[in-house]
Amino acid sequence: MTVRRRRPLHPAALLRASLLAATAALLLAACAGPPPPDWALDASAALRQVQAAALEGRDRVEAAEFARAKAQLARTGRADWLARAELLRCAAHAARLDAGDCPGFEALRADATPADAAYADLLAGRLQPAQLPLLPAHHRRAALGDTAAMTATTDPLAQLLVAATLLRAGRADAAVVAQAVDAASAQGWRRALLAWLHVQRRQA
């Protein structure tokens, strides 16, 4: 049986799903064929745990799993992958409405792809118009203040990030916030749910 080798995914395509799924896809695609090496499996599993722990508010688990993911990625010598891992963690924090920059990513920005840099600037609220084409459609629409962007993706993390972008711009109406609450609730993301419930109570 012939094994077909998969090409690494383009950075813009990687951002069409959640950042976590994109990172896992990148790691496994880069391995060029089954079975993937242990470092890729370990890093992908750790990054999934980082996302879940951050959104659930399990800080110790998040820190431990992120250290494990970074240790595995460091073995590759790929600073761009380390930058993406930092960005993934910051995306989870942005989804639970933690304010602030992403210092881990900023330290590696020079090695990051333009698409990842655009994503980081979106999370930080300083996206430039020229960066819009680098983002997937739902994030472009959110950056332009389109409240219907929430319905443009079914990925729960992406929905929370869209809602966070709209909230920062003062465009998150009651329907947007309700969808964010539902997305966090359906996934059992306790920390994110509490943050969005607080926004909902403020609006009420």
Image (cartoon, grey):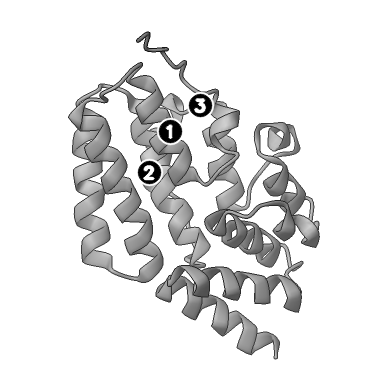
Q: In the shown orientation, is residue 98 left or right of residue 54?
A: right
Q: 65 or 152, which is in the foreground?
A: 152
Which label is found at residue 86? 2
| Amino acid type assigned to the residue bearing label 1 in the image | Ala
Q: Quadrant of residue 2?
A: top left
Answer yes or no: do the residues labelled 2 and 1 have beta carbons within 8 Å? Answer: no
Q: Residue 176: x, y in percent? A: 71, 70
Which of pointers 2 and 3 lies earlier in the amino acid sequence? Answer: 2
Q: CA distance from mark 2 to mark 1?
A: 16 Å
- Quickly name the residue at label 3: 113
> Visible in this render: residue 80?
no
Mark 3 or 1, which is nearer the eye?
1
Answer yes or no: do the residues labelled 3 and 1 have beta carbons within 8 Å? Answer: no
Q: Residue 108: x, y in percent? A: 38, 33
* Number of numbered labels in the structure image: 3
Mark 3 crowd level (few <14, some 14–19, many ≥20, 10 Å Cα) = some
* Secondary structure type for disc 1: helix
Mark 2 crowd level (few <14, some 14–19, many ≥20, 10 Å Cα) = many
Which of pointers 3 and 1 lies earlier in the amino acid sequence? Answer: 1
Q: 130 or 14, which is in the foreground?
A: 14
> Visible in this render: residue 175?
yes
* Secondary structure type for disc 2: helix
- Quickly name the residue at label 1: 25
* Secondary structure type for disc 3: loop
Which of pointers 2 and 1 lies earlier in the amino acid sequence? Answer: 1
| Amino acid type assigned to the residue bearing label 2 in the image | Glu
Q: Quadrant of residue 23?
A: top left
Q: CA distance from mark 2 to mark 3?
A: 13 Å
Mark 2 or 1, which is nearer the eye?
1
Q: Quadrant of residue 119?
A: top right
